[in-house]
Image: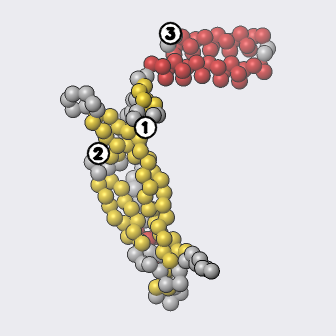
Amino acid sequence: MRNSKEIMDIGRRSLILLSLSGLFLLLPQVVSAVLLMMMITQAAAKPHRKSSEGFVEETVPLRLDPSNLLPSIKMSSLANVSISPWTYNISRDDSMFPNVLSQAHCSLSGCVGSDKQEDRDLQSRPIMHQVLVLRRVKTEEEGHSYHYRLESKLISVGCTCVRPKVTIQQ
């Protein structure tokens, strides 16, 4: 089996031959073929296994550098001046990365009207957003070995004001 370096050398030689012969029209296909061979070679080298749900699990190296994360910006001022105000509930899960998630909770059932009073003709509803998290899972081997599984979570990030859904019954 060829390694990535050998494949890159083959790709480089192919590009030189193409440029010398003037066949620039084939360049995208050759580049695509070389990249595909590289991906197949790298994927074949990684351990794969079928999960109980039937999909293939793939283990990939992951390096997290907290210095690359953006600092969180306080949005409390927006939450307080909205016509559908909300507060944040903070949940912590040490088996997850990030280990702290803030979820919005609508403060009112209705919305704030122009008279600064709650208007029950309108409804406050959460705005939902899907985020990706890493879940720390103990491996089946002996010892203190763990891996991280990518999961998605649906969290509320704020609240908005909507008209109530009215269904006319016959």
Picture layout, residue 120 above or below residue 90: below
Q: Is residue 60 visible?
A: no
Quick check: 67 left or right of 110? Answer: left
Question: From this viewpoint, which residue is outermost toward the front?
Answer: 170
Type of amino acid at the residue the image marks with label 1: Glu
2 or 1: tag closer to the N-terminus: 1
- Confirm or deny contact between disc 1 and disc 3 (CB under 8 A): no
* Tag in front: 2 or 1: 1
Looking at the picture, how far across and down is residue 43, in whole percent?
Answer: 49, 23
Type of amino acid at the residue the image marks with label 2: Ser
Q: Residue at x 36, y 66 (%)?
A: 88
- Confirm or deny contact between disc 2 and disc 1 (CB under 8 A): no
* Residue wearing tag 2: 95
* Residue wearing tag 3: 1
Q: Residue at x 71, y 24 (%)?
A: 28
In this view of the protein, which residue sits in the foreground, 24 or 87? Answer: 87
Type of amino acid at the residue the image marks with label 3: Met
1 or 3: tag closer to the N-terminus: 3
Q: For the residue carrying disc 2, how many other residues have a C-alpha within 10 Å: few (<14), some (14-19), or many (20+)?
A: few
Q: CA distance from mark 3 to mark 2?
A: 38 Å
Q: For the residue carrying disc 1, how many other residues have a C-alpha within 10 Å: few (<14), some (14-19), or many (20+)?
A: few
Looking at the picture, how far across and down is residue 146, in whole percent?
Answer: 28, 34
Q: Residue at x 49, y 80 (%)?
A: 111
Task: Indicate the secondary structure of the residue bearing disc 1.
Answer: loop
Q: Residue at x 31, y 58 (%)?
A: 91
* Residue wearing tag 1: 53
